[in-house]
Image: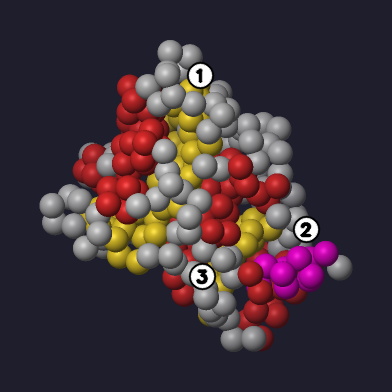
Amino acid sequence: MITLEEYLDGTGAEQELKELVRLIAAQATPIREAFLTNQTYAGTTNQSGEEQAAMDTWADRHITEVLQRSGLVREVASEEQNDILKIPESHGEYAVVMDPLDGSSLIQVNLAVGTIVGIYDHGTVMQPGEKMRAALYMLYGPMTVLTLTVGEGVQIFALDNNNQYVLLEADVKMPEGNLYGSGGLRTVWTEEHARFIDTCEQEGYKLRYSGSFVADFHQILKYGGIYCYPAVVGKERGKLRLMFEANPIGFIATQAGGAICDGRMNVLTINPEKPHQKTPLYVGSKGLIEKVNGTLCT
Ligand code: AHG
Ligand code: MN
Ligand code: MN
Ligand code: MN
């Protein structure tokens, strides 16, 4: 089976990007090993006002230290850090955005959670998602899976028994599918969103929603359909973060022939104003996203 190194050597990715991708992907192992002793909450809250799980802060500190030591990264923006971390002594030009632990409320119930990372070049994180140089997520499920794009389509790898990433699926294409998931309480959905979900159900779409974006998205990437975290009454910007969740996942989705919108426009074209800004989010098969834009634009 092709290893991650062999795949990267066959792409046009520059040497330092290959090194950075391998370095980040390798953190899946220490992160997985930390779950057992980090089941609780840290007693702190992040910029989004969320209570931080012990694993949120553990994974954030761990990955940040690895990035700082690499000398490849000039800026890091994280869901779990208030401000953008600047690393002026780095010789590299990359800027990393990350959700170090996505789905952290599910650790205690042993459901699949993940790490989401976006990599920009030109040294700054404050760029629209469409300018990403690479995007990846690690998904800690029955297998440890790495989904990666360096702008040449989407590949899925898994850690083998020698702790090596081997290629599971090359050039992944998101099918149209028949799954949907939506966050937010039905009681506070907007009329347009409720109408869109009703249409999906009338057309036979099945509900798949675990509360872990990475796990729920991975299912949509493989089987097709849509994941929504919409604007809801009282939370017009939804819940998920533009820079740490929507952009890296949206970049992967578009590289696999899917799409991402906020109910009005392509999320990847949004120029971020604040690191922790939120966005309503519909990501999935292109046909459905066009329907969202149709339905929700009326
Ligand atoms: P995080 O753990 O990084 O804060 O992300 C949690 C997010 C996302 O993973 C998931 O889809 C969503 O929150 C679930 O929200 P609800 O609990 O409101 O459904
Ligand atoms: Mn969180
Ligand atoms: Mn998250
Ligand atoms: Mn998180």
Report the number of discs.
Answer: 3
Mark identifier at residue 264? 2
Magenta stretch, residue numbers: 288-297
* SS for callout 2: loop
Q: CA distance from mark 1 to mark 3?
A: 36 Å
Q: Nearer the viewer, residue 152 or 191?
A: 152
**Left or right of residue 133, residue 278 in this image:** right
Q: CA distance from mark 2 to mark 3?
A: 21 Å
Disc 2 C-beta below 8 A from ligand 1: no
User: Residue sitting at 53 percent across and 33 percent down?
Assistant: 121
Residue mark closest to the camera, 2 vs 3: 3
135 in relation to 216, above or below: above
Judge whether residue 276 is colored magenta: no
Disc 3 C-beta below 8 A from ligand 1: no
Kind of residue sitting beneath label 2: Arg
Mark identifier at residue 72? none
* SS for callout 1: strand
Residue 1 occupies quadrant: bottom left
Image coordinates of residue 203 in percent, x first then y, are 64, 86
Kind of residue sitting beneath label 1: Lys
Image coordinates of residue 83 in percent, x first then y, are 56, 23
Q: Which residue is mark 3?
A: 174
Q: Can see residue 214?
A: yes
Q: Dot 2, crowdedness within 10 Å: few (<14), some or many (≥20)?
A: some
Residue extending furthest toward the right: 298
User: Residue sitting at 68 percent across and 58 percent down?
Assistant: 261
User: Residue sitting at 43 percent across and 65 percent down?
Assistant: 171
Image coordinates of residue 193 in percent, x first then y, are 73, 67
Mark identifier at residue 86? 1
280 in relation to 283, above or below: above
Judge whether residue 295 is colored magenta: yes
Q: CA distance from mark 2 to mark 1?
A: 33 Å
